Structure formats: structure tokens, C-alpha cells
Amino acid sequence: MIGGIVMILVALWVYQSAMRANVSNVIMWVGISAVAFFVIQTLLVQFNIYILESIRSSEGGSGYERDLLTVGDRKNEGGFQGFGGTLLSIFFELMPPFAGFLGVAVIRNRFILKEPMNIANLFSGIKEMFQGIKQSFKSSEK
């Protein structure tokens, strides 16, 4: 859910940046950025699952692994309880969309805007994007 919202915002950001830079094939760059975001996010989600499964299986014991004929879920509670577990869950939830955003920011900066790589250029245009979204909700009636 979070990743989908971030993906929509990233697509808008790339579209507005490409329109301001007068780049040909704007829709192609938005598509490339969306695919790159999705691929990076998917890879990191799979990597997070691998990390979680390796941590849980090392703590689980005989209750974690079940045989093929047993119906039901594995007993994978425990391990990630308390404040540390909450922080770890938040990290695993937010890291894939954030990494996808950074990947698209590099593509946008390097290939669309063709600007030097620095923090200011990497995140430029975000404020303008949110201002444009805010303006789109205002009515034209006076």
C-alpha cells in the first residue's frame, strides 16, 4: 500500500520534471521510472523476506518447520516482539519504497535532467510537485 502511493508520487515527480526539462518521450521516461521503481521494490521485498525467514528459522526450533502433511501455519511468533521488533518491522516496510524512490531519483537526475549528482539535484522538484498537487484541488470559482 505504501509502495503504491509512493510509486504514484514518483511517477508524477518524473513526469513534471521531464515536462520542465523539455525531454522528448516523456511517457517513455515515466514508464522506465515506474518499472525501475517496481523492480527495485520487488527485489528488496524478496531480500527482506529472505532476511526475516533466516532470522526466524534460526530462532524457531521444531515448532517453526512443519511437515508437508500438517495443515496450518508455522509458529513464527516470538523473536520480533517489543520496541525493537516494531522498529525492525517499520524498517522492513519502508525500506523497499524508499530504495525505489532513490533509484528513480538517480535515473531522473542522470538521464532526464542530466545534472551533476548531488543531494540538492537528486531531490529537486519534490516541493514543486506537491505544490502542483495542492493547486489541482483548488476550485476555479471565485
Image (cartoon, rainbow, N blue to C red):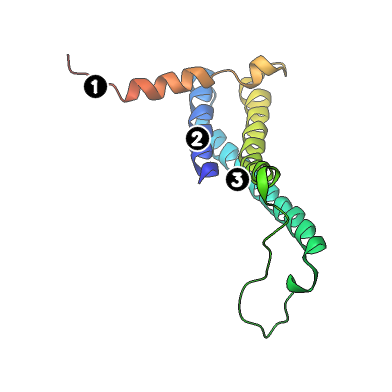
Is residue 32 placed above or below 137 in the rendered structure? Answer: below
Residue 116 location (% of width, % of height): 72, 16
Residue drawn 41% across and 21% down?
Answer: 132
Mark 1 Cα-neighbour bin, 10 Å: few <14, some 14–19, many ≥20: few
Residue 32 location (% of width, % of height): 59, 39
Residue drawn 70% across and 59% down?
Answer: 78
Q: Which mark is residue 139?
A: 1
Front-lying residue, 27 or 55: 55
Is residue 35 placed above or below 109 in the rendered structure? Answer: below
Is residue 61 placed above or below 70 in the rendered structure? Answer: above
Which secondary structure, mark 1? loop
Q: Amino acid at mark 2?
A: Ile
Q: Amino acid at mark 1?
A: Ser
Which secondary structure, mark 3? helix
Q: Which residue is mark 3?
A: 38
Q: State the separation of the CA atoms marked 3 and 2.
A: 16 Å
Residue 139 lies in what quarter of the image?
top left
Is residue 88 placed above or below 59 in the rendered structure? Answer: above
Q: Which residue is mark 2?
A: 27
Which secondary structure, mark 2? helix
Of the residues tagged 3 and 1, which is closer to the observer?
1
C-beta proximity under 8 Å, tags 3 and 2: no
Residue drawn 70% across and 55% down?
Answer: 49
* Residue ranking furthest to the front: 82
Q: Amino acid at mark 3?
A: Phe
Q: State the separation of the CA atoms marked 2 and 1.
A: 28 Å
Front-lying residue, 123 or 71: 71
For marks 3 and 2 on the same chain, the one whose residue lies earlier in the sequence: 2
